[in-house]
Image: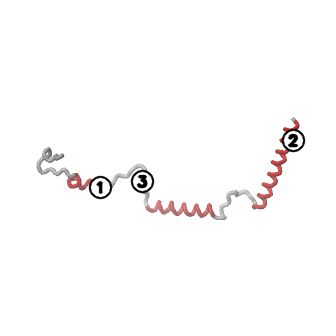
Amino acid sequence: MDTSSQNEPGEDMNVRLVHAAIWREMAEPSERRRGLPWYLRRMYAVMFILGAIYLLSQAFDWNEYEDSTRARMLRDMERQKVMEQQRAAANSQGARS
């Protein structure tokens, strides 16, 4: 469809040529992603890496109140014995009724 007859004489309908300044403009920032300064990005990266190293190293103990692994093992074994005794007592009471 030829629309040149509807335009004023000398009017160019190619928007890219007429409004080239619009195409050169930078896009406006969106709400989803805002640019962070380079120094903040680097600081966050360094903090993340050091945090991961700390958590994965032996300096970080998930059970900080435990004296030693042997003490934990002995405590867990004692806890297992107590639980087995409680189960046996509950089963013997259930069998009597």
Q: Nearer the viewer, residue 11 or 95?
A: 95
Query: Which residue shows up at 65% across the image and 61% down it?
Result: 60
* Mark 3, residue position: 34
Q: Nearer the viewer, residue 12 or 34?
A: 12
> Is residue 64 rendered to the left or right of residue 92?
left
- Residue type, label 1: Glu
* Disc 3 secondary structure class: loop
* Disc 1 secondary structure class: loop
- Pointers 3 and 1 in contact (CB under 8 A)? no
- Pointers 3 and 2 in contact (CB under 8 A)? no
Up-down relation of residue 5 to residue 51 (above or below): above
Task: Choose the circle earlier in sequence order: 3 or 1.
Answer: 1
* Disc 2 secondary structure class: helix
Query: Which residue shows up at 37% across the image and 52% down it?
Result: 29
Residue 38 at x, y percent in the picture: 44, 62
- Residue type, label 2: Ser
- Residue type, label 3: Arg
Q: Residue at the far right: name it.
A: 96
> Is residue 18 rendered to the left or right of residue 50?
left
> Where is the C terminus found, in terms of image quarters?
top right
How far is mark 3 from mark 2, CA to CA? 67 Å
Residue 6 at x, y percent in the picture: 14, 44
Residue 25: mark in rendering: 1
Residue 87 at x, y percent in the picture: 82, 45
Q: Nearer the viewer, residue 40 or 92?
A: 92
